[in-house]
């Protein structure tokens, strides 16, 4: 079964208007390909289903900081959710203004705080400890405070961000302490923030997190915006039940509207999705080089591995896989494994795929979020190249280093 944005046409599998097999011929494999129009459609869909105005979207660039994607999101009017000084510099080099960047801090150093303040970005503090240090160094400024929504949700234990076992956000019960620290330093809290988790399947969890944060928001008189983080789930498995985002958006808007009415001011509603915007727009194309028949298992070895796409190994995540070069053949069951010296280097187990032969190209879908950006050079294999597709054109965005170039870079002092 084909999952969007891929379509099959006359035996070829296309993304945007381009054949992925031809693209691999041109740019080699392993190759990440991102379809900008798909990312753009996802971006625009948010304001269709969340009708509240003003609505601001801060793209969670940790999911994919490809420079062409960043520039594209800037052209669409997105802001940036940044989580490190590196993110800030990368976003600025893609043309974002400092006031379009919200820096959500997490166990940062004083140097990192000063650096972010010097860059002029908006600052989001998530612990009482950091708030105290901030208040003594930057009195009289404006700030956003991240609270922990006290809701545990996400598609894997590692992807649940709320709850008191989590390292993220100030506990709701500490709101008074936040107020006391900032009042003494003449700091205005102009924004509140929470993020519940990633890949949230239950819409109720999102509503509950919103309500929990809003239950304390009335205590903060200077608010201009409230940011409810990311976490919007998109399907990774064709059989997965899809979330009704129209209804979801309607409920979100109603919850926020009710709060703003009682608060007495129309605040800006913010979200910072990553996966929702970029997961589906990307594929990782790999080439099959070794097939073994191990008693009952057919094991397919490819020229990539967990350093390029770690989600199946790390979270047990499902990523749909398509045989680009033999799409109509009889299906068999396969394990798809990588080229790394790790037994956990597995993209999929027991996966039905049209007959796979050595030399075939496979496309691993939903590779637009948290794949290249979580990538590494483990086993000293370079990261794949990245291309961006827009309509019928493809452009090399990031080149693949040769082994020699990689080693040269690492040997330079
Ligand atoms: N905002 C904050 C404060 C976050 O911590 C995150 C994700 C997001 C927004 C965006 O979440 P998204 O919309 O992408 O679910 N590596 C994991 C995901 C880690 C997410 C960490 N924070 C994965 O591959 O599933």
Image (cartoon, grey):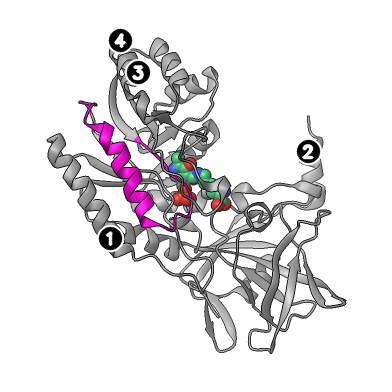
In which quadrant is the N terminus drawn?
Answer: bottom right
- For marks 2 and 3, give the one nearer the viewer: 3
Q: Secondary structure at mark 4?
A: helix
Give the residue pinned by disc 2: 410
Where 167 sits versus 331, above or below? above
Residue 215 magenta: yes
The numbered mark, 1 or 3, whose residue comes first in the sequence reads 1
The numbered mark, 4 or 3, whose residue comes first in the sequence reads 3
Q: Secondary structure at mark 2?
A: helix
What's the distance in space between the residues labelled 2 and 3, CA to CA?
A: 47 Å
Give the residue pinned by disc 3: 177
Where 34 sits versus 372, above or below? below
The numbered mark, 2 or 4, whose residue comes first in the sequence reads 4
The residue stretch that appears in magenta: 193-222
The numbered mark, 1 or 4, whose residue comes first in the sequence reads 1
Image side of residue 209 versus residue 130, left or right: left
- For marks 1 and 2, give the one nearer the viewer: 1
Q: Residue at x 17, y 45 (%)?
A: 258
In which quadrant is the C terminus drawn?
Answer: top right
What's the distance in space between the residues labelled 1 and 4, CA to CA?
A: 41 Å
Q: Residue at x 44, y 33 (%)?
A: 103
Q: Residues within 10 Å of mark 4 (few under 14, many from 20)?
A: few
Residue 373, position as x, y percentages in the image: 59, 48
Callout 4 touching callout 3 (CB < 8 Å): no
The numbered mark, 1 or 2, whose residue comes first in the sequence reads 1
Q: What is the number of the mark on residue 184?
A: 4
Residue 360 magenta: no
User: Where on the picture, by quarter, is residue 261?
Assistant: top left
Give the residue pinned by disc 1: 49
Callout 1 touching callout 4 (CB < 8 Å): no
Residue 30, position as x, y percentages in the image: 70, 62
């Amino acid at each position: 079964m084909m999952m969007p944005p891929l379509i099959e046409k006359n035996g070829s599998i296309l993304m945007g208007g381009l054949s992925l097999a031809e693209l691999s011929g041109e740019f080699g494999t392993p190759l990440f390909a991102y379809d900008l129009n798909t990312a753009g459609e996802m971006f625009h869909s948010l304001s269709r289903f969340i009708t509240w105005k003003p609505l601001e979207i801060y793209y969670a660039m940790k999911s994919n900081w490809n420079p062409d994607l960043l520039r594209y999101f800037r052209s669409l009017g997105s802001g940036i959710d940044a989580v490190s000084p590196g993110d800030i510099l990368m976003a600025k080099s893609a043309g974002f203004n400092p006031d379009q960047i919200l820096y959500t801090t997490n166990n940062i150093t004083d140097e990192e705080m000063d650096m972010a303040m010097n860059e002029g970005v908006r600052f989001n503090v998530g612990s009482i400890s950091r708030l105290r240090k901030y208040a003594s160094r930057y009195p009289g400024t404006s700030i956003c405070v991240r609270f922990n929504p006290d809701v545990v949700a996400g598609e894997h234990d590692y992807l649940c961000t709320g709850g008191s076992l989590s390292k993220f956000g100030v506990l709701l019960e500490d709101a008074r302490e936040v107020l006391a620290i900032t009042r003494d330093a003449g700091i205005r809290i102009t924004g509140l923030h929470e993020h519940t988790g990633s890949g949230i399947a239950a819409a109720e969890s999102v509503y509950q997190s919103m309500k929990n944060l809003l239950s304390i928001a009335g205590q903060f008189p200077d608010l201009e915006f409230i940011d409810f983080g990311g976490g919007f789930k998109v399907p990774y498995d064709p059989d997965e039940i899809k979330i009704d985002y129209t209804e979801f958006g309607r409920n979100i808007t109603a919850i926020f509207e009710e709060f703003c009415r009682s608060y007495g001011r129309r605040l800006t509603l913010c979200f910072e999705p990553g996966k929702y915007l970029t997961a589906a727009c990307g594929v990782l194309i790999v080439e099959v080089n070794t097939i073994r028949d191990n008693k009952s298992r057919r094991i397919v070895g490819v020229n990539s591995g967990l350093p390029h796409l770690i989600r199946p190994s790390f979270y047990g995540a499902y990523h749909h896989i398509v045989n680009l070069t033999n799409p109509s053949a009889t299906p068999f069951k396969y394990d798809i494994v990588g080229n790394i010296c790790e037994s956990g280097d597995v993209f999929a187990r027991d996966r039905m795929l049209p007959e796979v032969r050595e030399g075939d190209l496979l496309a691993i879908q939903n590779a637009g979020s948290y794949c290249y950006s979580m990538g590494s050079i483990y086993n000293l294999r370079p990261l794949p190249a990245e291309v961006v597709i827009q309509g019928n054109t493809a452009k090399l965005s990031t080149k693949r280093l040769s082994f020699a170039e990689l080693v040269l870079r690492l040997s330079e002092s």
